[in-house]
Image (tube, grey):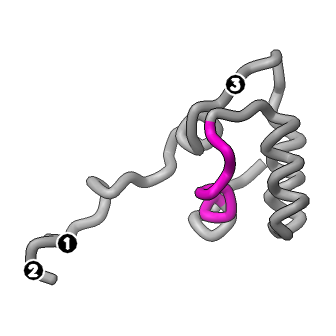
């Protein structure tokens, strides 16, 4: 399983919180690339509910990870 920003971005509009099956269903219905669906299927699921993409990909960058000043724009 591998995630990139491009792949993870396909789940930004997912109905959080969601189960693994709900996320797979969302990915299929929204036309996400096959890699997103495969990544979701590889998650070891114990009936967990995921609150956000960070629960699936802990290294997902947040706004704090980018070095720009929003006040300048």
Q: Position of residue 34 (x, y in %)?
A: 89, 64
Residue 40 belongs to the span the image colors magenta = no
Check contact, mark 1 vs mark 2: CB within 8 A. yes
Q: Position of residue 22 (x, y in %)?
A: 82, 39
Task: Tell me the magenta residue range.
Answer: 8-16
Q: Is residue 47 left or right of residue 2?
A: right
Q: Is residue 59 left or right of residue 37?
A: left
What residue would you read off at disc 1? 68
* Mark 1–mark 3 distance (CA, rounded to whole Å): 33 Å
Check contact, mark 1 vs mark 3: CB within 8 A. no
Q: Is the stretch drawn in magenta largely helix, strand or loop? A: loop
Residue 14 belongs to the span the image colors magenta = yes
View extreme (left): residue? 72
Q: Residue at x 27, y 54 (%)?
A: 64
What residue would you read off at disc 3? 49
Report the front residue among 28 and 64. Answer: 28
Image quarter hosting the C terminus:
bottom left
What residue would you read off at disc 2? 72
């Amino acid at each position: 399983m591998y995630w990139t920003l491009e792949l993870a971005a396909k789940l930004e509009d997912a109905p959080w919180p969601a189960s693994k099956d709900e996320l797979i269903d969302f990915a299929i219905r929204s036309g996400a690339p096959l890699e997103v669906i495969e990544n979701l299927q590889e998650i070891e699921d114990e009936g967990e509910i995921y609150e956000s993409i960070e629960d699936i990909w802990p290294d997902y960058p947040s706004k704090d990870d980018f070095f720009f000043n929003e006040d300048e724009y």
